[in-house]
Image (tube, grey):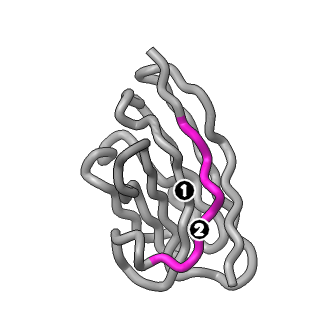
Amino acid sequence: QVQLVESGGGLVEYGGSLRLSCAASGRSPLIMAWFRQAPGLEREFVAALSRSGAVTYYGDSVKGRFTIPRGDGENTSNLKMNNVRHKDTAVYYCAAGYQWTRDATGFDYWGQGTQVTVSA
């Protein structure tokens, strides 16, 4: 079992920055990831990090703007959001699992979600 706790959501101005954090406890997952879901839309892959912290990959909509710092990995994942846009407004979820995938169904454990709202 893996327990995930997210923090850091809130209101951010258009073009600004925000950092989300996810702390994992229990069994160490192979991969930690971030997804987001806006009202009326499907859950979307944002970014993922290997347990070692050496491998990261990003969804096309956030590539070049969002990063996961090197050094994160085994039990933590921080998502640094830069140059945020209105389309980034969503509930952000931390996820953990044991498959290399961008598909939400491939993740076994989920946090409770944290709201990010980009203001004008």
> Whole-percent x and y of residue 86?
38, 28
Residue 61's quadrant in the figure? top left
> Whole-percent x and y of residue 117?
52, 31
In this rendering, position of residue 96 left or right of residue 23: left
Q: Sort mark 1 into few (<14), some (14-19) or many (20+) by Cα contacts within 10 Å.
A: many
Residue ranking furthest to the right: 26
Give the structural element (helix, strand or loop) at label 1: strand
Please, is residue 33 above or below residue 83 in the view? below
Q: Sort mark 2 into few (<14), some (14-19) or many (20+) by Cα contacts within 10 Å.
A: many
Please, is residue 33 above or below residue 8 in the view? below
Asked whether disc 1 touches disc 2, contact meaning CB atoms under 8 Å apart, the reply is yes
Q: Which residue is mark 1?
A: 93
Residue 110, which numbered label?
A: 2
Range of the magenta residues? 107-116
CA–CA distance in space, label 1 to label 2: 7 Å
Please, is residue 115 above or below residue 76 in the view? above
Residue ranking furthest to the front: 40
User: In front here: 51 or 85?
Assistant: 85
In this rendering, position of residue 1 left or right of residue 116: right
Choose the circle earlier in sequence order: 1 or 2.
Answer: 1
Residue 43's quadrant in the figure? bottom left
Residue at 42 percent of width and 43 percent of height: 38
In this rendering, position of residue 12 left or right of residue 54: right
Residue at 54 percent of width and 56 percent of height: 93
Q: Quadrant of the C terminus?
A: top left
> Whole-percent x and y of residue 58?
34, 57
Give the structural element (helix, strand or loop) at label 2: strand
Residue type at mark 1 is Tyr
